[in-house]
Amino acid sequence: MSEPEQTPLDQAKRFSVDNYAYRSAPRLGVRGWLRWGWRQVTSMRLALVLLLMLGLAAIPGSLLPQWPTNGAKTQSFIDNNPGIGPWLDHVGLLDVFGSAWFTSIYVLLFLSLIGCIIPRAVAHGKAARVPVASAPSSLARYDGRLEASSPLSQAEAVAAVRAWGRGHLVWGWLTGYRVRVDERTARDGTPQVAVALEQGSLREWGNLVFHTALVGLLCALAFGSAYTYRGQAIVVEGQTFTNAAVEYDSFSAGRLFDPAWLKPFTLTLDKFVPVFDLTGRPVSFTAHVTYAKPGKAAEDATIKVNHPLGIDGGNIYLQGNGYAPMLTVRDAAGNVAFSGPTPFLPQDGVYTSTGVVKVPDVTSGPQIGLVGTLYPTAAQAADGTVSSVNPQAVNPVMLLTAYKGDLGLDTGIPQNVYQLDQTKLTQVLGDDGKPLVIDITLGQTVTLPDGLGTVTWDSLPRFVALDLRADPSLPWVLGMALAVLLGIAVSLFAPRRRLWLVFTHSEDGDVPGGRTLVEAAALAPPHDEAAARALASALAVSAGLPVPRPSARQEE
């Protein structure tokens, strides 16, 4: 059965609705589909959708632990949530900003903004070169039309309005008016001079600045994520920290950052001074440090909460603090198997702290593990329980439980320094056959049962947790963010208006040389209340009165 004959109207309808209704209809082809895809990507609607998607996609990065910022916490989250944790990690929700889907949104938004900026900039450049439209032949039909008589000559009045409209010599091209002057003849044959003033390019400039700054902001964020680095380290009083990747307890960097680029310096924690009020509430924390760079003299400095120390483009923040008991453990042969400070992590506001001491280097006998709880100001309740009543070390007491066996440090599997793997360990028992709990005070030495050796509590220094961050993109991010705000503000609030003034010479017998009659009108959006004031100012200038030039103050 043959196809019905197509009328021109049917062809037009079918062609506009379905390009493939007939085999004879033209196809888009690869080039056409690419052009269509590019138009979709560069549309403002898609840019807004992508911007919204980018904001929504960033939400999991602030709600869930992330591998680049805290690997230990992320692994703990996966272990504690065996059902959903591995799935979240598989889809990239535990590394949001490094995931493929987040990067795809980022790149598409970048391309969309570029596609919006280029044609807009070209169109704005062409529009800027188009001459200002001439004044209408009649201003009588415009609301708010004004008339005045000027003592200036026609040429003087026109020159005054031209100078006023162009504004400041330096930035008048941005905030002033574009001016056009035409000599013409009225319908009755009277010679006139028409001045047209147009303002609105500032609005478009603001739009371009907004989009360009948004692209710059994306570039700055991408640069920062590639070249930033961050490290955390615990430093005990009297110890020195060296700025090297291996010296950090945890270190993360951008994909393009080389740890060899770290600038060398040393930082020594001379003293940590905490201040608490009478109720034990913290008042201030101050770390007194000494830092030195190669070839330069050492300098003293302080680090406080929210007052970091800036060194070589990075900032060192005070993130935490606590106690690090100095313990000496001797093995069964009487040799020192361990000696040094061990950071204990605070568990509450009165610095009840827990920590682990691992003693693998024994000359004889099994390896030793100690799990301790530190009470800075110990107090015993009526039921015999011990607790701390003050964060300061007024009456420090430590309770230790001991383990013996294989610590598992030779397996090559990384371990948490604050946890003791008890898989191959046996808890040491007391004489009564119950798990041994050692009550030790500062300066005391206790003997471990089963001939394991002794433990001495030598001193109680404090430690600080330092966080070094360096992001070379921060100044650019700040600058671009401010430019985004400036651009959007200008594009929203900058006026778009036209002013027209028509000058006609009038012979007045009372004035030598006659007068100049001025007729003025304005065309502006209804919400632009400043247009009437600008028109009145232009009319006053034409009369020789002193009026400020056009500025942001007049546009408010």
Image (cartoon, rainbow, N blue to C red):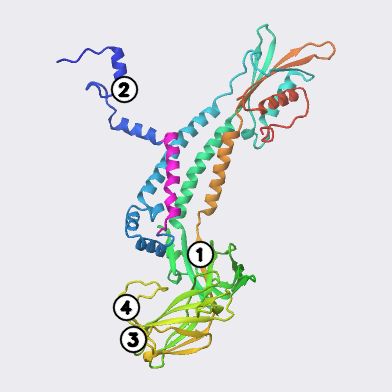
In the image, residue 339 sits, relative to residue 54, either above or below, namely below
Q: Which residue is mark 2?
A: 17
Q: Are marks 4 and 2 in contact (CB under 8 Å)?
A: no
Q: Secondary structure at mark 1?
A: strand
On the rendered structure, is 476 left or right of 170?
left
Distance CA(mark 1)–CA(mark 2) = 61 Å
Q: Residue furthest right?
A: 510
In the image, residue 247 sits, relative to residue 203, either above or below, namely below
Q: Which mark is residue 468?
A: 1
Q: Amino acid at mark 1?
A: Leu
Q: Amino acid at mark 3?
A: Pro
Please name whichever residue, 537 or 54, is drawn nearer the observer in this view of the structure: 54
Q: Which mark is residue 410?
A: 4
Q: Which residue is mark 3?
A: 366
On the rendered structure, is 18 left or right of 62?
left
How many numbered marks are there?
4
Q: Are marks 3 and 1 in contact (CB under 8 Å)?
A: no
